[in-house]
């Protein structure tokens, strides 16, 4: 065992033993108004290329943070050079474990803008060390990992967490909340969610029978750390630069990616929690390795208090459009949708969004921060005078996180809020992967009709050397 590996293991064991006392309390930053105005959150960036790089810019643009460390397994590659140039004084690392080992005392918070499968170990180590966390959605790839992350957050109540569904700090969030509280949105029986743009679809053959052939690892890339706890795969460009999202081994597909921006407010304010049944209705191009080319998945939720049972039906795939209600009108594209690897979302026949059916009203909405409208238009005019005033957001999602680190606000999408939604997505992925209906016990958090599907709540064991992150 190397000296660094040994010191890291000792370091993690100490973190486990001292987990109750290591959290940095936001109140420490807010004891004095004059001091808090001068303070900036000392932020480490893990993942600085593509989407991770854009998150870095957005956090820095708030003026509320100082970038003290950069970490990326492909440090120095073309897609990471811009952020390296922006912050030349920040310490540089390829391995987040080494970053925390060597620079933990300089770091107050961490941004995690890495592939889905790598969120869990980075966040668990950060939580164990009392570091505030901004992590891209989805929280993690498996139901069990998300459960552990929520448990760890509860153990460290002074650690601020925020998941990167930016619309949760924009107009969509405040409007949905106000309309729900005013009784405009009530007795919802069905939500139809759709993501039918081609950005997430590739031309690979669904008749695949093995993983891609290995290729030379790009010079300077730490591929072994990129894989983290996942079983070893030979490097392939089909896993890199955003392609990882298509594979069951590394990503959560269109559902885990776009569901966070389309279903977040409905899930929170309709108090949905976890479904009791998940049904794959259509899976076009189903295979054992990557997500179907088109998916229609139904989630069933029980009665909640005075709210009736309701279903969510998810549609993805270029040629997989839901039926539209009379008076739907046009479909607009939210201009705030971020790029992925520089590729903007292209206009489609039906842009990403949702249709909400209640017993007396129908609402249509887009994605991210897009607001809802009542349809058809004559019904909207009739309701106009009854609509409540909607508050204006005090901060965007990035400022909300950093202000929360400073004790000035509370995050709008912490693990306790977003975690159950991310678990909904993980159940949908299991239904996609096995092409089988799922019966789920919300109390025991187990799949009751299929032992193999139940085993996928935890998925395969972590690779040797990564087990410790499941014990933090």
Image (cartoon, rainbow, N blue to C red):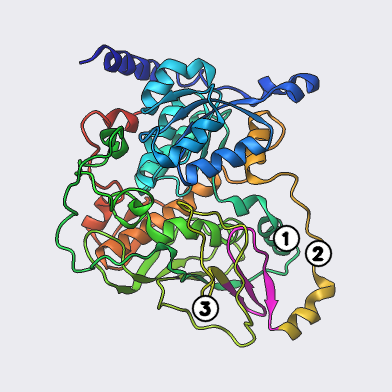
Magenta extent: 355-376
The dot on residue 349 is 3
Which mark lies nearer to you, 3 or 2?
3
Q: Look at the numbered disc 2 and give the secondary structure of its residue.
A: loop
Q: Position of residue 426 (x, y in %)?
A: 38, 54
Which residue is pictured at 22% across the width and 65% down the height?
287
Q: Look at the numbered disc 3 and give the secondary structure of its residue.
A: loop
Marks 2 and 1 sit apart, C-alpha to C-alpha, by 9 Å
Give the image quarter of residue 402.
Answer: top right
Q: Earlier in the sequence, mark 1 or mark 3?
A: 1
Label 3: how many Cα within 10 Å (few below 14, some 14–19, many 20+): few
In this view, the residue in front, 85 or 440, is 85
Label 1: how many Cα within 10 Å (few below 14, some 14–19, many 20+): few
Marks 3 and 2 sit apart, C-alpha to C-alpha, by 32 Å
Q: Are marks 2 and 1 in contact (CB under 8 Å)?
A: yes
In this view, the residue in front, 77 or 304, is 77
State the quadrant of the C terminus: top left
Q: Position of residue 399 (x, y in %)?
A: 67, 39
The dot on residue 424 is none
Q: Is residue 442 visible?
A: no
Q: Position of residue 94 (x, y in %)?
A: 37, 28
Q: Which residue is mark 2?
A: 388
Which residue is pictured at 21% across the width and 31% down the height?
464
Going by the image, does 281 lie left or right of 91?
Answer: left
Q: Which residue is mark 1?
A: 181
Label 2: how many Cα within 10 Å (few below 14, some 14–19, many 20+): some
């Amino acid at each position: 065992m190397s000296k660094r590996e040994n010191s890291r293991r000792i370091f993690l064991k100490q973190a486990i033993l001292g987990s109750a006392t290591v959290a940095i309390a936001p109140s420490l930053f807010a004891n004095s108004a004059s001091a808090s105005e001068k303070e900036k959150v000392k932020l480490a960036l893990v993942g600085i290329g593509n989407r991770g790089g854009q998150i870095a810019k957005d956090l820095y643009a708030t003026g509320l943070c100082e970038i003290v460390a950069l970490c990326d397994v492909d440090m120095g590659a073309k897609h990471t050079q811009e952020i390296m140039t922006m912050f030349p004084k920040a310490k540089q690392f390829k391995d987040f474990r080494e970053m925390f080992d060597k620079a933990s005392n300089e770091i107050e918070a961490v941004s995690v803008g890495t592939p889905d499968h790598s969120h869990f170990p980075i966040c668990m180590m950060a939580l164990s060390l009392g570091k505030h966390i901004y992590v891209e959605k989805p929280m993690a790839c498996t139901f069990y990992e998300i459960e552990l992350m929520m448990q760890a957050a509860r153990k460290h109540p002074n650690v601020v967490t925020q998941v990167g569904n930016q619309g949760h700090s924009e107009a969509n969030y405040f409007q949905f909340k106000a309309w729900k509280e005013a009784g405009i949105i009530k007795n919802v029986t069905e939500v139809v969610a759709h993501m039918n743009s081609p950005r997430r679809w590739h031309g690979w053959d669904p008749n695949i029978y093995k993983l891609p052939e290995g290729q030379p690892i790009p010079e300077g890339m730490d591929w072994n750390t990129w894989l983290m706890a996942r079983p070893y795969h030979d490097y392939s460009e089909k896993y890199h630069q955003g392609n990882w999202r298509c594979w069951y081994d590394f990503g959560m597909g269109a559902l885990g990616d776009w569901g966070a921006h389309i279903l977040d407010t409905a899930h929170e304010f309709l108090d949905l929690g976890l479904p009791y049944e998940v049904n794959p209705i259509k899976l076009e191009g189903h295979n054992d390795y990557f997500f179907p080319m088109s998916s229609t998945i139904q989630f069933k939720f029980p009665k909640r208090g005075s709210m009736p049972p309701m279903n969510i039906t998810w549609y993805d795939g270029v040629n997989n459009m839901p039926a539209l209600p009379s008076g739907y009108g046009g479909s607009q594209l939210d201009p705030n949708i971020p790029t992925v690897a520089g590729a903007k979302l292209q206009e489609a026949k039906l842009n990403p969004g949702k249709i909400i059916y209640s017993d007396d009203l129908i609402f249509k909405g887009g994605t991210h921060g897009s607001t809802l409208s009542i349809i058809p238009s004559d019904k909207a005019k009739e309701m106009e005078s009854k609509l409540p005033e909607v508050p204006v957001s005090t901060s965007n999602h990035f400022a909300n996180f950093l202000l929360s680190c400073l004790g000035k606000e509370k995050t709008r999408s912490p693990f306790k809020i977003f975690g159950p939604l991310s678990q909904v997505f993980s159940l949908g992925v299991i239904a996609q992967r096995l092409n089988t209906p799922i019966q789920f016990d919300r109390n025991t958090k187990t799949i009751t009709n299929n032992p193999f599907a139940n085993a996928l709540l935890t998925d395969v064991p972590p690779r040797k050397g990564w087990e410790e992150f499941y014990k933090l």
